[in-house]
């Protein structure tokens, strides 16, 4: 963020298959080990080889909320990166490239072109990835960092491949480091050291680990970007944690198995993206009708249909609200960042268990596939687990009614296998004792009773959720409203606005259902000017806010090109609207990837 | 009580009769429906095996035959059209000590649920799947099903069907099912024996059951089947031989075989192959949350 002492964005571009991940990971490890915070966004396409991949690794002595606005250093692994991004640089930023194979384009006067004669430095033409290691060494020199920090990291990274490989990699990295010291102008930065090493995770890791902490025992999935990371985390930890992880035939199977496992008493979860979620919806309705607690995660990507599989969007809000036929309640939450996603999973499981209903978590590619540093001390690995009114002890008396019409609407839930509690659950409308009311004759009074019983459960849910809070001064010039993953970018935009003399406050919505309509209305009634920021075309949240509160915002900032907002996109949109130029601002994505 | 200990026939500790499995409500199937015989056979089989109702979970989809859980005294899940096998798979993995019996019709299992049928068979999960095959869609008032004969005239094929039917038995064999049988609702005694064998079988067990629909399918009624049905045990047939099983399953004309076509006893089940189930009992009964050691290991992996 702008006001930190150290705030630096390293960008690495190349084709898929050129090994971008390796220098990216090496650099990330270098920073987080010394306690420097990190936020990495990888822009890529649905392709395994070729195309254009662009990694932005932003590091700071403060928590890094977004991948930022600027490129402070560019490493080009191919000519395409040079051609696409040279024009995005300024202010003395260095551009590193293999001068054997890449021609520099025309740069603005301030840009420092740093060609690396890779063949000469490495004396190695066998390995095409060697240019990455040479460049890593050069980056260390440009950042005035100690070479040993990198050397130690590389030695650890290649240890398993033997001493010869370690020596080769450390050697070429050192050659790059020394060449840069001799030929390039080091940057005017001082890379800090934090008090302790930080951990690294992705948003998908956070969702999966949140499930593990919540006690998930069953996880099923069909691979789908950008949700696949949850499956990978679950699969790699399944045996250690005793979690049944299954990859199954389709998302219909995934969701139905999840409900089946949940019915026996497991905490059960699944994750997918919008297309898979569409297939899951009938089973979500089943969980609503059978009153089975289970959690379904939709990691949104740009739609509709197959859409842009590797790009982000907040386009599935109404799909979540309308998932499955019929009139029933479900919990819906949109976490605001990776740490929040981690904490949200145990929270929604407790509520789903308490209210015996489906819970839907809306993430997106930005949160889920982003890589972040996190302070391990902030991770609550043993969150509260509350299973609600669950019967676990056998009984010698009969007469159990699974759907007892109680005052709260919550009927104590017994698990199958328990003596004295033999019972049936059904997707047909049923009586308190599970007998289908569509058998022989339907009974309007019973039907009404059961609809009201299920609905009554939800009259209490808002009390379990903290109302959203307004951040910033109450009398600000403008109130920015966002939901889910836009929390970080709005926070940074407000800092930029403050620097320009504009005061702004911020209302971020996480819980969609239940929704604190009264608290939100109260907050917004005091706002001078309101702008809703969201990553879609039609203003899905604006419409939802209007439906729940009657409130219509004064203006909108929307982005639907597949790339997430950068802070200045929001800042520019606010300034344009305060100047009275537009009611709806659509920022231009300058970095084309 | 662990179901695995009750599957042995004639457990002296439990004295149960078919009446103990009578559900809360009387079946609302049409008079003469083949499904009555299937319900009776299942009740007899469970009583003979001495499995207490609380150790059984029936799972069904949607359709006339999928109403069975309501007419049967045990835990039950009356789920979505075509999804019974998927729900049952989740339930079995959640609590593998339950005896999970899946019931449904030909449209439910071989049509809308066809994808799950394929994959459940190859997984060899320990489920018993009873398909009441009446070669018609009954609850939607008479349209062709995936097992309807070529040329069959129904409300959706008034000039005769031009699609060939699926063969559920050869499909199941090819997909990797380890117990594949055919029953006939008109011979409930034979059917009860088949159901017992299917429940006792470790792995995915399919019984495709001719369960005639007296209301909508007048081509394949009891009078059609009665002269044609021939139990396989009257023939020389090795149920360990999949090729012979397929040959017998394809016989369709004056003779139609019933009985166990294929049974492979040595193939491990999904539950046996899954390391997470090796010890610790049913997942649904294990403590929730992470141990200190597990939590430390997870954080260490992030550093």
Image (cartoon, coloured by chain):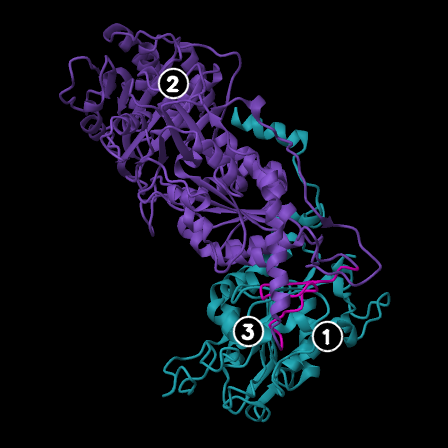
Q: Nearer the viewer, mark 2 or mark 1?
A: 2
* Residue beneath the point at 22% across and 23% down: A88
Say which chain tag 3 marks.
B
**Which residue is identified by label 1?**
B43
In the rendered image, residue A209 lying in the magenta stretch gets the answer no
Classify residue A267 as left or right of residue A562.
right
Q: Is residue A160 visible?
A: no
Q: Nearer the viewer, mark 3 or mark 1?
A: 3
Q: Is residue B232 visible?
A: yes
Magenta stretch bounds:
A420-440
Between the C-alphas of marks 2 and 1, the distance is 70 Å
Classify residue B299 as left or right of residue A69.
right
Label 3 packing within 10 angstroms: few (<14), some (14-19), many (20+): many
Q: Earlier in the sequence, mark 3 or mark 1?
A: 1
Residue A547 point in image, percent of width and height: 43, 47
- Element at label 2: loop
Q: Nearer the viewer, residue A475 or B238?
A: A475
Which disc, if any, is residue B63? 3
Q: Supply the letter of whichever chain is cyan.
A: B
Residue B200 point in image, percent of width and height: 70, 67
Would you say the magenta stretch is mainly helix, strand or loop?
loop
Q: Give the quadrant of the N terminus of chain B.
A: bottom right
* Residue beneath the point at 29% across and 28% down: A569
**Which residue is identified by label 2?**
A1
Residue extending farthest to the right is B13
Asked if residue A487 is positioned above or below residue B21 in the image, the reply reads above
In the rendered image, residue A431 lying in the magenta stretch gets the answer yes
Say which chain tag 2 marks.
A
Residue A401 point in image, percent of width and height: 73, 61
Mark 2 on the same chain as mark 1: no
Between the C-alphas of marks 3 and 1, the distance is 20 Å
- Element at label 3: loop
């Amino acid at each position: 963020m702008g006001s930190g002492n150290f705030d630096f964005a390293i960008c690495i571009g190349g084709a898929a298959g050129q090994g971008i991940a390796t220098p990216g990971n090496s650099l990330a490890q270098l920073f987080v080990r010394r306690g420097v915070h990190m936020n990495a966004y990888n822009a890529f396409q649905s392709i395994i080889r070729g195309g254009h991949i662009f990694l932005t690794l932003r590091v700071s002595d403060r928590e890094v909320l977004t991948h930022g606005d600027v490129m402070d250093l560019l490493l080009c692994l191919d000519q395409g990166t040079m051609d696409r991004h040279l024009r995005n640089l300024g202010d003395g930023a260095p551009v590193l490239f293999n001068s054997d194979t890449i021609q520099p384009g025309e740069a603005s006067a301030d840009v420092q072109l740093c060609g690396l004669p890779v063949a000469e430095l490495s004396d190695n033409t066998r390995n095409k990835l060697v240019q990455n290691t040479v460049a890593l060494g050069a980056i260390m020199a440009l950042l005035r960092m100690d070479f040993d920090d990198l050397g130690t990291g590389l030695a650890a990274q290649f240890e398993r491949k033997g001493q010869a490989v370690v020596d080769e990699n450390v050697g070429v990295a050192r050659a790059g480091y020394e060449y840069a010291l001799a030929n390039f102008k080091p940057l005017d930065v001082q890379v800090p050291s934090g008090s302790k090493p930080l951990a690294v995770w992705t948003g998908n890791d956070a969702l999966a680990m949140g499930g593990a902490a919540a006690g998930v025992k069953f996880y099923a999935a069909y691979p789908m970007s950008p949700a696949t990371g949850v499956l990978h985390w679950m699969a790699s930890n399944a045996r250690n944690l005793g979690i049944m992880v299954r990859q199954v035939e389709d998302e219909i199977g995934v969701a139905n198995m999840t409900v089946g496992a949940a019915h026996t008493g497991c905490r059960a979860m699944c994750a997918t993206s919008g297309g898979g979620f569409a297939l899951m919806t009938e089973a979500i309705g089943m969980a609503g009708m059978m009153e089975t607690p289970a959690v379904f995660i939709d990691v949104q990507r740009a739609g509709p249909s197959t859409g842009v599989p590797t790009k982000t969007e907040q386009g599935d809000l109404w799909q979540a609200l309308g998932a499955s036929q019929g009139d029933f309640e479900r919990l819906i939450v949109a976490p605001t960042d990776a740490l929040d996603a981690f904490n949200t999973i145990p929270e929604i499981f407790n509520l789903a268990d308490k209210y015996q209903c489906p819970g839907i978590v809306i993430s997106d590619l930005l949160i889920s596939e982003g890589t972040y540093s996190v302070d391990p001390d902030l991770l609550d690995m043993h969150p509260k687990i509350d299973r609600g009114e669950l019967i676990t002890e056998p009984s010698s008396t009969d007469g159990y009614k699974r759907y007892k019409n109680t005052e709260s609407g919550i009927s104590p839930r017994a698990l199958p296998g328990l003596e004295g509690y033999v019972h049936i659950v059904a997707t047909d409308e049923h009586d308190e004792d599970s007998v289908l009311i569509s058998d022989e004759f339907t009974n309007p009074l019973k039907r009404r009773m059961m609809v009201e019983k299920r609905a009554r459960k939800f009259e209490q849910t808002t009390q379990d959720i903290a109302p959203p809070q307004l951040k910033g001064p109450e009398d600000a010039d403008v109130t920015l409203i966002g939901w889910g993953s836009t929390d970080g970018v709005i926070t940074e935009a407000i800092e930029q606005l403050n620097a320009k003399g504009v005061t702004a406050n911020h209302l971020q919505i996480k819980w969609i259902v239940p929704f604190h309509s009264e608290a939100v209305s109260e907050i917004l009634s005091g706002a001078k000017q309101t702008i809703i920021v969201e990553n879609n075309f039609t203003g899905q949240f604006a419409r939802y806010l209007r439906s729940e509160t009657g409130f219509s915002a004064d203006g909108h900032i929307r982005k639907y090109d597949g790339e997430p907002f950068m802070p200045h996109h929001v800042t520019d949109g606010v300034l344009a609207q305060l100047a009275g130029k537009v009611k709806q601002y659509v920022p231009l994505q300058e970095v084309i990837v | 009580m662990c179901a695995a200990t009750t599957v042995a026939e004639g457990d002296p500790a439990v004295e149960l009769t078919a009446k103990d499995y009578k559900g809360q409500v009387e079946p609302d199937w049409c008079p003469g429906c083949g499904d009555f015989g299937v319900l009776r056979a299942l009740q007899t089989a469970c009583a003979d095996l001495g499995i207490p109702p609380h150790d059984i979970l029936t799972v069904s989809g949607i359709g006339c035959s999928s109403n069975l859980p309501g007419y049967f005294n045990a835990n039950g899940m009356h789920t979505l059209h075509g999804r019974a096998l998927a729900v049952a798979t989740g339930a079995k993995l959640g609590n593998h000590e339950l005896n999970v019996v899946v019931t449904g019709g030909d449209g439910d299992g071989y049509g809308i649920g066809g994808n799950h049928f394929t994959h459940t068979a190859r997984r060899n999960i320990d489920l018993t799947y009873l398909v009441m095959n009446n070669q018609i869609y009954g609850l939607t008032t008479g349209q062709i099903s995936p097992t309807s004969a070529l040329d069959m005239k129904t409300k959706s094929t008034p000039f005769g069907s031009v699609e060939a039917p699926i063969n559920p038995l050869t499909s199941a064999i090819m997909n990797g099912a380890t117990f594949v049988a055919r029953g006939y609702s008109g011979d409930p005694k034979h059917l009860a024996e088949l159901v017992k064998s299917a429940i006792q079988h470790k792995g995915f067990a399919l019984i495709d059951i001719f369960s005639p629909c007296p209301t909508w399918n007048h081509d394949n009624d009891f009078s059609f089947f009665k002269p044609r049905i021939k139990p396989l045990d009257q023939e020389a047939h090795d149920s360990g031989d999949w090729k012979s099983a397929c040959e017998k399953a394809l016989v369709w004309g004056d003779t139609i075989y019933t009985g166990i076509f294929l049974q492979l006893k040595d193939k491990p089940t999904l539950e046996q192959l899954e390391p997470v189930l090796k010890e610790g009992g049913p997942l649904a009964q294990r403590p929730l949350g992470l141990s200190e050691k597990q939590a430390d290991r997870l954080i260490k992996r992030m550093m």
